[in-house]
Amino acid sequence: MTTEYEWLSLDPDEEVVWTGQPRVWRIAGTVAGGAILTLLAFGGAIAVSTGNLPGIDGLSGSSNSIVWGIAVLIALSQVGSAAFAYLRVEHTDYVLTNRRIYRKAGVFSETVTSVGVDRVQNTTLHKDVTGNVFDYGTVSISTAGSGGADLSITDLTDPETFRDRLQEQVRAAEAARGEERSSAAETGELDGEAMAALLTEARRLRAVAERMEEHA
């Protein structure tokens, strides 16, 4: 599955479990707005050049060319906006592996953001009114200690599938950590958190002992 994602570099034990993109329909507003503005521009050019507006007579050849040139420029700019909006969707990829969540975005340059599934603390699914009707939404991902969403997977069709797959990987990561801690306890090995706690307690006991010696 990674052959179509040349930007994705996985660890040897990392496997892709889900891929997705924003829905193309997210550009509908941009396209509709551009179409309306283009129609208004050409409608205005026709009205001005034919003298159908009150107080405006038919324009001369050079003035008529300027009016139509402006209308064409407006139309081209709206086509460019719609094309760029489409390219933004096509160049945005979401990938979930058994280790991390990746988001790649950017048309002329790529930005890849990732969050480890073992750091995920909370996921929030948001759907607006139209999202409930057409089944699309955004999943916001927060990690431990963060003040808000660290990563947002936006405009997904059937976002529940992504959220469920992510929660499966989070539970698997939690189970793996539990097994590692149990194994460490059985073999007498200490993880980083346990070692830090023991060092803190040792420093506290040493400080108490030093105070007792001073008062002896």
Image (cartoon, helix red, strand yellow):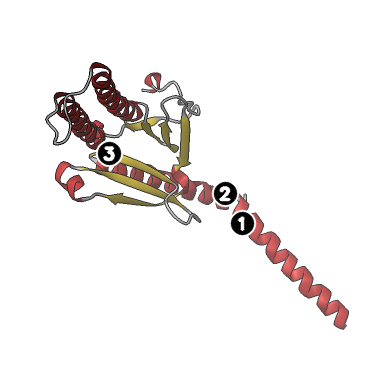
Say which residue label 3 marks. 156
Direction from residue 139 to residue 108 in the image, left or right: right
In the figure, residue 23 lies in which quadrant?
top left
What residue sits right under mark 2 in the picture?
A: 184
SS at mark 1 in the image: helix
Q: Earlier in the sequence, mark 1 or mark 3?
A: 3
For mark 2, does the 10 Å Cα neighbourhood hold few (<14), some (14 to 19), or many (20 or more) residues?
Answer: few
Check disc 3: other Cα within 10 Å, few if <14, some if 14-19, many if 20+: many
* Total count of labels: 3
Residue sitting nearer the eye, 178 or 153: 153
Between 106 and 48, the one lying in front of the other is 48
Q: SS of the residue at dot 2?
A: helix
Q: Pointer 2 and pointer 1: residues touching (CB < 8 Å)?
A: yes
**Is 101 drawn above or below residue 107 in the view shown?**
below
Q: Nearer the viewer, mark 2 or mark 1?
A: 1
Q: Nearer the viewer, residue 143 or 86?
A: 86
Identify the residue at horizontal 70%, vertical 60% (top origin).
199
The x, y position of residue 117, in whole percent, is: 44, 43
Residue 9 placed where, x, y %?
Answer: 49, 26
Separation of residues labelled 2 and 1 (CA atoms): 10 Å
Q: Disc 2 or 1, which lies upstream in sequence?
A: 2
Could you tell me which quadrant the N terminus lies in? top left
Measured Cα–Cα span from mark 3 to mark 2: 41 Å
- Based on the displayed image, in which of its 4 quarters is residue 206 positioned? bottom right
Q: What is the three-letter code of the residue carrying label 2? A: Ala
Amino acid type, residue under disc 3 in the picture: Leu
Task: Reply above or below: 130 against 81.
Answer: below
Which of the two residues, 114 or 182, is positioned nearer the viewer here? 114
Give x and y (percent) for residue 98.
41, 36
Depth-wise, is mark 3 or mark 2 nearer the camera?
3
